[in-house]
Amino acid sequence: EEVLTLLDAMSRASRQEPGCRRYRVHQGTEDPRAIVLYEEYGAEADFTAHCASAHFQDLVIGRIVPLLEQRDVLRCTPRAEAAA
């Protein structure tokens, strides 16, 4: 619950950042300890600024990460759709 409360604060702050298109927190239905963040930014520079922000450093690095059993980060880029 502490991680989810901190992520609520992180979501609010992140959604105010320039270039943040989406920031959603998902919780597992079968295992409520599983949490997935879906973040989308307009450009790589926006994501870099997000990671350098004071709220990211305080909330994620300083307070959330130490509470996690494990943390996997998967960075993706949208795939262009093929012409039909």
Image (cartoon, rainbow, N blue to C red):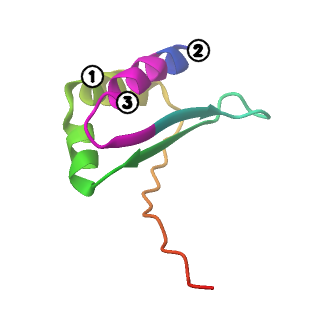
**Seen in the image, is 8 located left or right of residue 34?**
left
What residue did someone put label 3 on? 15
Percent position of residue 35, x then y: 59, 34
Query: Residue 18: within the magenta?
Result: yes
Q: Give the range drawn in magenta.
A: 6-22
10 Å crowding of disc 1: few (<14), some (14-19), many (20+): few
Percent position of residue 58, x then y: 27, 22
What residue did someone put label 1 on? 58
Task: Quote the CA–CA distance across marks 3 and 2.
Answer: 21 Å
10 Å crowding of disc 2: few (<14), some (14-19), many (20+): few
Asked where in the image residue 49 lies, by quadrant, the reply is top left
* Quadrant (top left/top right/bottom left/bottom right) for the N terminus: top right
Looking at this view, is 17 or 27 the one in front? 17
Q: What residue type is labelled 2?
A: Glu
Task: Quote the CA–CA distance across marks 3 and 1.
Answer: 16 Å
Q: What residue type is labelled 3?
A: Arg
10 Å crowding of disc 3: few (<14), some (14-19), many (20+): some
Above or below for 45 versus 17: below
Percent position of residue 7, x then y: 46, 23
* Quadrant (top left/top right/bottom left/bottom right) for the C terminus: bottom right
Q: What element carries label 2?
A: loop
**Seen in the image, is 74 located left or right of residue 26?**
left
Query: Residue 59: within the magenta?
Result: no
Which numbered disc, 3 or 2, marks the residue that appears first in the sequence?
A: 2
Report the residue at 55% width, 32% height from top.
25
What residue did someone put label 2 on? 1
Which numbered disc, 3 or 1, marks the residue that appears first in the sequence?
A: 3
Single out the residue that lies furthest toward the front.
84
Which numbered disc, 2 or 1, marks the residue that appears first in the sequence?
A: 2
Percent position of residue 6, x then y: 44, 18
Say if mark 2 contacts mark 1, CB within 8 Å: no
Q: What element carries label 1?
A: helix
